[in-house]
Amino acid sequence: MSNQDWLERSRKAVWHPCTQMKWHEDFPLVPVQRAEGVWLYDFDGRRILDGLGSWWVNLFGHGHPRIVQALQAQLKELEHVMLAGFTHEPVVRLSERLSQATGQQLGHCFYGSDGASATEMALKMSAHYWRNCGMPEKNGFMALAGSYHGETLGALGVTDVPLFRAAYAELIRDSTILPSPDIRLGPSAAAKALEALELHLAVHHARTAALIIEPLVQAAAGMVFHTPEFLAQVYATCQRHRVHVIADEIAVGFGRTGTLFAHEQAGIVPDFLCLSKGITGGFLPLSVVMTSDDIYAAFYDDRLARGFLHSHSYSGNPLACRAALAVLDIFEQEAVIATNQSRQAQFEAMVAPLKLDPRIAHFRHRGMIWAFDVLSDATDFSRRFHRAALHQGLLLRPIGTTVYFMPPYTLTDAEFQFMVEAARQALDEVLPL
Ligand SMILES: Cc1ncc(COP(=O)(O)O)c(C=O)c1O
């Protein structure tokens, strides 16, 4: 079977995500036969560098042998068992190791399969905590302008992306949206956001359960950065008003911002930590919400109705947990955070020409994320750039006019150089100098 056969069959039978299917009439899907390291291979043997880790899930390249071996071993023992009333080694070990990674501060792990479900679970847990504490009216939520926390109905309630909300507006419960602390707007933006938070909570704290935030980088907003100091101040303000902080590290967790978890850089411990995406290195769907002894204790009771009510068939799937354990092994044994850090000077030298490009503004970098804004008014810039980059053998999908690199950490210097050069050539095609 050729590329052409698979893309025709896929177009008929598969409804693809985040896609206007009609656009594929003249913009072919990319059928992927296999993948290895940072490279995706189509059915004609052509290769494409996965510059966004397949939507931010792939940390160590495709087919990483340690994760493959771990999964093969697990497959021989236990593929799945329901987690209500049963338990198993991978889920226990993973929960213990994740807790350890938070200094045992978030010692209770509740599992789902996707990021949006983690958001739902954290929102439900927060409001249910306050209900169990005799404050059922404390059930409102806050989020930052531009935030993205997933696209199920509850998650859309704290997601501020007009395109994703508008079509489902009647189905969504509104939240309070605070101004953006985007560093591109200067330090006054963070001050304004903090002021709005304080003003809102001064009046509404008794009706507010939690603020949900993507620590340090609002990824789907277009790689919008805020400072660790801002995050620390948000946390302090919420604590003062007895409002939970939910750290959504679904995109930024697992080393992406330069520390294992982004919130560490602000010196805080959130009330809830949501993880997914990179947790299995991009092998299997898994998400987790981690929380503290205090919150867990509020659910611990003889009555079922005071327990956390969220049932999911694949909760704590052994295969996914085993992949996640292999990911944690790689972090430890290959000193991933330190290695990424030690390579920053080389990366910096390779992206330096982009910073001088007159078509680019706001070049920014944090950990293993690089982003810049292209000075273009074209509403179809993202599609055109995506297509031009594919033509160069590079997978990138700009968000609006923001181009970003979020590659697997294992890419070599030569692959990094290829990524930067292919992006520059794609830019030349879309926006000639
Ligand atoms: C910060 C953040 N939260 C939640 C989600 C939703 O995750 P999922 O696509 O697995 O539902 C995403 C996905 O991009 C995300 O970036």
Image: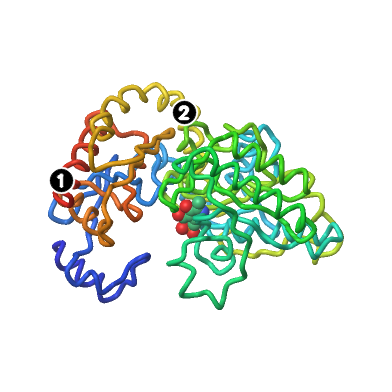
Position of residue 9 measured from the top left corner of the image (x, y, whole percent): 22, 72
Do we see residue 39 in this rendering? yes
Residue sitting at 45 percent across and 48 percent down? 219
Residue sitting at 76 percent across and 52 percent down? 202
Query: In the image, is residue 130 above or below residue 96?
Result: below
Residue in the foreground of this view, choosing between 210 and 70 = 210
Position of residue 135 measured from the top left corner of the image (x, y, whole percent): 83, 61
Secondary structure category for the residue under label 2 = helix
Marked residue nearer the N-terminal end (1 or 2) = 2
Residue 272 relative to residue 336: left or right? right
Compute the Cα span from label 1 to label 2: 34 Å
Q: Which residue reaches farthest front?
A: 188
Near mark 1 (Cα within 10 A), the count class, few <14, some 14-19 or many ≥20, is some
Query: In the image, is residue 147 above or below residue 26?
Result: above
Residue sitting at 54 percent across and 47 percent down? 214
Query: In the image, is residue 61 above or below residue 42?
Result: above
The quadrant in which the N terminus is found is: bottom left
Residue 361 relative to residue 430: left or right? right
Secondary structure category for the residue under label 1 = helix
Residue sitting at 26 percent across and 33 percent down? 416
Viewer-side label of 1, 2: 1
The quadrant in which the C terminus is found is: top left
Near mark 2 (Cα within 10 A), the count class, few <14, some 14-19 or many ≥20, is many
Residue matched to label 1: 428
Q: Amino acid at mark 2?
A: Ile
Query: In the image, is residue 425 above or below residue 100?
Result: below
Q: Which residue reaches farthest bottom?
A: 170
Position of residue 23 measured from the top left corner of the image (x, y, whole percent): 24, 70
Q: Amino acid at mark 1?
A: Asp
Residue matched to label 2: 337
